[in-house]
Amino acid sequence: YFTYPPERPLTETAYDRLATIAQHTEMGAGMAVALKDLEIRGAGNLLGGEQSGHIAGVGFDLYVRLVGEAVADFRGEAQEEFAEVKVDLPVDANLPVEYLPGERLRLEAYRSLASATTDEAVEAVRAELLDRYGPIPAQVENLLAVARFKVLCRRFGVTEVSLQGSAQGGTVRFSPVDLPESAQLRLQRLYDRSHYKPAVATMSIPRPKGPTGPLRDVALLDWCAQALAAVVSGHEILSR
């Protein structure tokens, strides 16, 4: 039962809610009530905490992929499959509100980077950001560097790069990495105290330190790229 003070006039929204419930009393009418409620309240903030759950719980990459898959299924389009790469390193990489004030614009930029599977595609996103929004802040450059690093990881079949242990040190873990004996010897020669676990195809290398402490941000990404290329292929790559 829903009651309201008879001496007070109902607002238009309150009347709509009561009328909706009164008009949909049959079994299975919950969907109609939910749709009307969505119409009254609006869709809410997709990127914030106002709705049930928060996008941070799944991450932008997974969220954008899920949205893309849902849209493609609705349109009947076939999506090209590519390996998802998880990079869990101390990198300050994001699109700040001061640079892209609109949530829709930020979501589009994140989606473009998440779907970029080549260096050329990442550079195209960078050029568009520079053209539309001006000079690129450090956090955005870091985000672009993460996208380029993911392209390299896919090239070597790596799907996860993460920091294990203390934030002030620890080791960087690459997986899966299939190293023959020659590459395992190269790993031991190039990086002291490194480890390789063939059972789980995981390579761990101590995190390097710079003049001001353990590497982070783009410097750490560049080091990871060099380590991956040097161990897996035996060739160094040019720093960006």
Image (cartoon, grey):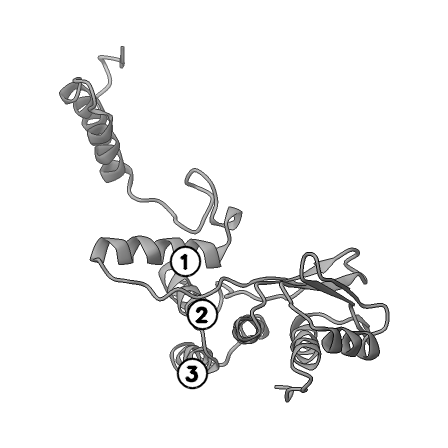
Could you tell me how far apart the alpha carbons at marks 2 and 1 are, in whole angstroms?
A: 10 Å
In x, y percent, where is residue 133? 42, 76
| Residue position marked by numbered label 1 in the rendering | 64
Q: Nearer the viewer, residue 146 or 44?
A: 146
In x, y percent, where is residue 73? 26, 54
Residue at 23% from the left image edge and 39% from the top image edge: 39
**Visible residue check, residue 43:** yes
Is the residue marked by circle 3 packed among few (<14), some (14-19), or many (20+) residues within 10 Å?
few
Is the residue marked by circle 1 packed among few (<14), some (14-19), or many (20+) residues within 10 Å?
many
| Residue position marked by numbered label 2 in the rendering | 113
In x, y percent, where is residue 120? 44, 83
Q: Nearer the viewer, mark 1 or mark 3?
A: 1
Residues under numbered marks 1 and 3 in contact, where contact means CB atoms less than 8 Å apart? no
| Residue position marked by numbered label 3 in the rendering | 127
Q: Nearer the viewer, residue 127 or 99?
A: 127
User: Split into 4 quadrants, where in the image is the N terminus?
Assistant: top left
Residue at 47% from the left image edge and 59% from the top image edge: 61
Toward the bottom, the furthest residue is: 238
Residue at 35% from the left image edge and 66% from the top image edge: 80
In x, y percent, where is residue 138? 59, 74
Residues under numbered marks 3 and 2 in contact, where contact means CB atoms less than 8 Å apart? no
